[in-house]
């Protein structure tokens, strides 16, 4: 309905390159907020939780928890109050939480602020997609989102590098000032250039009823529930790996100073996953892509764990030269796994729920993200100076996901988007 309003009248479209850049910047809020914190974890641990340095990892998962909770409400709120208003309100919340974290006296205060930061960041994460959908349809929309995502994939490569420069100059608290500056630039740009895309006549009254109805419908569909469960396990692998990666570089391999450069390499290598998926998914189908990727990760994580536990990598002949490159390749494979499965799982989860696609996306995104934090936080905290707990965890989670995929119907329905 909103398409008709948009096409009939008001919101003029920005030039496409500018619109794509703006959407990419809104998407990038999430990646920047997570990845820029990674180089700061050792200093935060030293200052705020010296007795238990592993706890500093919760800086990552607390933000993800807030983002997951916010995902449930941001979409429906934007349907009622307009896209720009909800993105702006989220940005104000995000900046206020960043200011609190910047002066926080304890780790607990930082973690509480990070949860609120995540709640605020859910606005740009969810509503920017709705904004694209208001202006573009079908293949045009897919093209805009894919271009924005291509720019977005560069953020994890540069965020830790930029953050390590900020830390060197002004200390770890200055990263939160950088978050405020980033959000202020994005919001200023949006306010100056992007008109509201959902006119008042197309807005829906805010009611708990439809959200509750959507939740019940999502939870009643076995295929959707299975896809959300597999997505939860894959997010668990991803967030657990993100939480542990800085400590592994620093404490296990003694490469803390060069961590941002290695992380940039991993991010750039793993960004090829979405292109690989685009090339193969039409031929192989989504279920086969997901299953093959997960079984491959079971073998890779299991093999890496076995090689480490047996002493082949940790203390044997290969330990000196091969342990670090093998770790880099395996970590890249975990990030690539996310690129190969998460989009496909989203499509499977939303396919039977086209009539409530916005609500269903909010519900499935919120459920999989919040539940994944409950897996990822203990997985990260299990760090013992070696990659073994993480590798075993990823192996078991991938095995669970691959096993769940076996319970889905073999044949993709004709209507299933490939």
Image: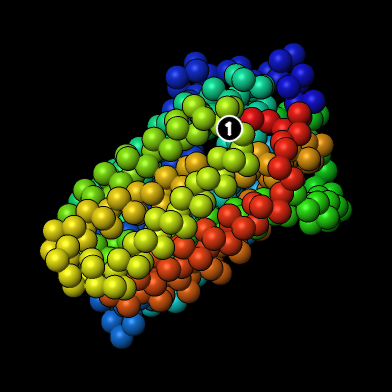
The answer to which of 19 and 362 lies nearer the viewer is 362
The answer to which of 176 and 227 lies nearer the viewer is 227
- How far across and down, in percent of the image, does residue 372 sit? 56, 62
Residue matched to label 1: 284
Asked if residue 33 is positioned above or below residue 396 in the image, the reply reads above
- For this orientation, the residue located farthest to the top is 8
121 with respect to 260 (left or right): right
Give the residue at x 29% y 69%: 308
Give the residue at x 76% y 29%: 415
- Residue 81: image quadrant is top right
Is residue 130 visible in this depiction of the protein?
Answer: yes
Mark 1 is surrounded, within 10 Å at the Cα level, by few (under 14), some (14 to 19) or many (20 or more) other residues, namely: few
The answer to which of 54 and 76 lies nearer the viewer is 54
- How far across and down, in percent of the image, does residue 351 sit? 73, 38
Asked if residue 279 is positioned above or below residue 272 in the image, the reply reads above
- Residue 287: image quadrant is top right
**Secondary element at tag 1:** helix
Give the residue at x 62% y 20%: 139
- How far across and down, in percent of the image, does residue 33 sit? 41, 52
The answer to which of 177 and 289 lies nearer the viewer is 289
- How far across and down, in percent of the image, does residue 114 sit? 47, 63
């Amino acid at each position: 309905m909103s398409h008709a309003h948009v096409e009939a009248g008001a919101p003029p479209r920005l030039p496409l390159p500018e619109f794509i850049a703006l959407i990419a910047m809104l998407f990038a809020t999430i990646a920047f907020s997570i990845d820029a914190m990674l180089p700061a974890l050792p200093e935060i641990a030293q200052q705020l939780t010296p007795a238990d340095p592993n706890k500093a990892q919760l800086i990552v998962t607390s933000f993800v928890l807030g983002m997951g909770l916010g995902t449930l409400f941001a979409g429906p709120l934007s349907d009622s109050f307009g896209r720009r208003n909800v993105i702006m309100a989220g940005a104000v919340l995000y900046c206020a939480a960043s200011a609190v974290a910047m002066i926080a006296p304890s780790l607990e205060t930082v973690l509480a602020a990070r949860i609120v930061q995540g709640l605020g960041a859910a606005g740009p994460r969810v509503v920017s997609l709705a904004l694209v959908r208001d202006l573009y349809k079908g293949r045009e929309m897919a093209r805009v989102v894919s271009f924005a995502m291509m720019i977005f994939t560069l953020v994890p490569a540069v965020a830790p590098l930029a953050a390590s420069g900020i830390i060197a100059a002004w200390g770890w608290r200055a990263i939160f000032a950088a978050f405020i500056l980033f959000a202020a630039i994005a919001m200023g740009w949006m306010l100056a250039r992007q008109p509201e895309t959902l006119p008042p006549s197309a807005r829906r009254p805010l009611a708990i009823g439809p959200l509750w109805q959507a939740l019940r419908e999502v939870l009643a569909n076995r295929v959707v529930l299975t896809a959300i469960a597999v997505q939860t396990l894959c997010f668990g692998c991803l967030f657990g790996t993100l939480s542990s990666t800085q400590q592994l570089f620093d404490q296990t391999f003694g490469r803390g100073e060069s961590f941002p450069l290695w992380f940039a390499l991993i991010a750039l290598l793993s960004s090829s996953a979405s292109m690989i998926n685009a090339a193969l998914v039409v031929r192989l189908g989504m279920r086969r892509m997901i299953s093959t990727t997960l079984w491959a990760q079971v073998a890779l994580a299991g093999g890496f764990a076995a090689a480490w536990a047996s002493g082949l990598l940790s203390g044997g002949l290969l330990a000196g030269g091969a342990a670090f490159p093998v770790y880099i390749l395996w970590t890249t494979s975990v990030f690539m796994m996310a690129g190969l499965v998460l989009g496909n799982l989203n499509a499977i989860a939303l396919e039977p729920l086209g009539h409530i696609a916005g609500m269903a996306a909010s519900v499935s995104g919120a459920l999989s993200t919040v539940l994944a934090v409950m897996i990822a936080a203990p997985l990260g905290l299990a760090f013992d100076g070696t990659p073994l707990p993480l590798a075993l965890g990823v192996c078991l989670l991938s095995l669970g996901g691959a096993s769940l995929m076996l319970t889905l119907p073999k044949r993709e329905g004709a209507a299933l988007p490939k």
